[in-house]
Amino acid sequence: MLNATVVALLVAAAPNLVGKWQGDGFVIVLEANGTGTMSDGPGVPPEPLKWKVSGNNLLITQDGETVPWAMKLNGKDSMTLSGEDLDEPITVKRGGANAKTEVAAVAPQQPNPNAMPMGTCESACKHYLGCAKLKGDDQMALCQYNCFASGANPYQLGVYNQLDCKRAISIVVAAQLQALAAMSQANNAGSSGGNKGSRCNGCVRDGSSCVWISQGNWGSGPNNPYSGAVSSCDADCCQ
């Protein structure tokens, strides 16, 4: 259910940008509760802001005005931002002093109703089991066990809770199919000594078909975690 593969998919669907980002003269602090600060030049005092991610855009709100910045992630700790109010694209990297201390020095922390609600394993499992129409204490216990083992954080679980049922279920199905594909690949290698070669890598039986599930064609937004891309494999790859 909510295993380690699902956590990886959640990260891809909605990247965790919490932290202090610096580069090209900018210092941007993004807190998990949707608040933060930004300084756009050396010696410029940081100003408070609110932020959230929408698709490939980082939405920055200051003084009641929201500006969308196109966001391109270069790994998990580097990103390039561009927008009409920027003279040219900037690249910032995550790292530095504790962000919460800097935000507190600028303005008191206030609850942000627009921030992503944090989640728990219990809430995520209730969402999944409700969508999948599964009931019973055993189902809940198994789901929560897998969730705790995955190490999912409250932000990632909050992202999952916001998905519609079709997307929430598709994430779990995609993770299960990928796990089966990995097991099938390992079994094929062990039983045949790798005679089938790379043509069978990642192939898994899906009903009466032998298919390969795309692992690199993920969507860009929080409601588009999986494209469903598949291609046929040779029948003997699943025997």
Image: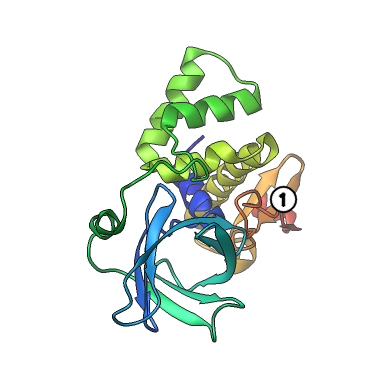
| Image position of 20 (left or right of 63) | left
> Residue at the spot x=62%, y=52% of the render?
225
Residue 40 image offset from top left, x and y in percent = 40, 77
> Residue at the spot x=35%, y=75% of the render?
22
Q: Nearer the viewer, residue 191 or 136?
A: 136
Q: Looking at the image, what colour scheme do you see?
A: rainbow
> Residue at the spot x=44%, y=56% of the render?
16
Q: Is residue 224 above or below residue 89?
A: above
What secondary structure is found at the residue carrying circle 1?
Answer: strand
Residue 170 image offset from top left, x and y in percent = 65, 42
Residue placed under numbered mark 1 in the picture: 210
Residue 115 image offset from top left, x and y in percent = 49, 45
Q: In the rendered image, which quarter is residue 71 located in?
A: bottom right
Q: Nearer the viewer, residue 122 or 145?
A: 122
| Image position of 154 (left or right of 116) | left
In the current view of this chain or complex, which residue is farthest to the front? 63
Query: Is residue 239 visible to us here?
Result: no
In the current view of this chain or complex, which residue is farthest to the top? 136
Query: Is residue 68 visible to us here?
Result: yes
Badge 1 amino acid: Cys
Q: Nearer the viewer, residue 234 or 27?
A: 27
Residue 64 image offset from top left, x and y in percent = 54, 57
Count of marks, rendered view = 1
> Residue at the spot x=48%, y=21% of the render?
140
Q: Is residue 56 above or below residue 118?
A: below
Q: Nearer the viewer, residue 207 or 116?
A: 116
Callout 1 environment at 10 Å: few (<14), some (14 to 19), or many (20+)?
some
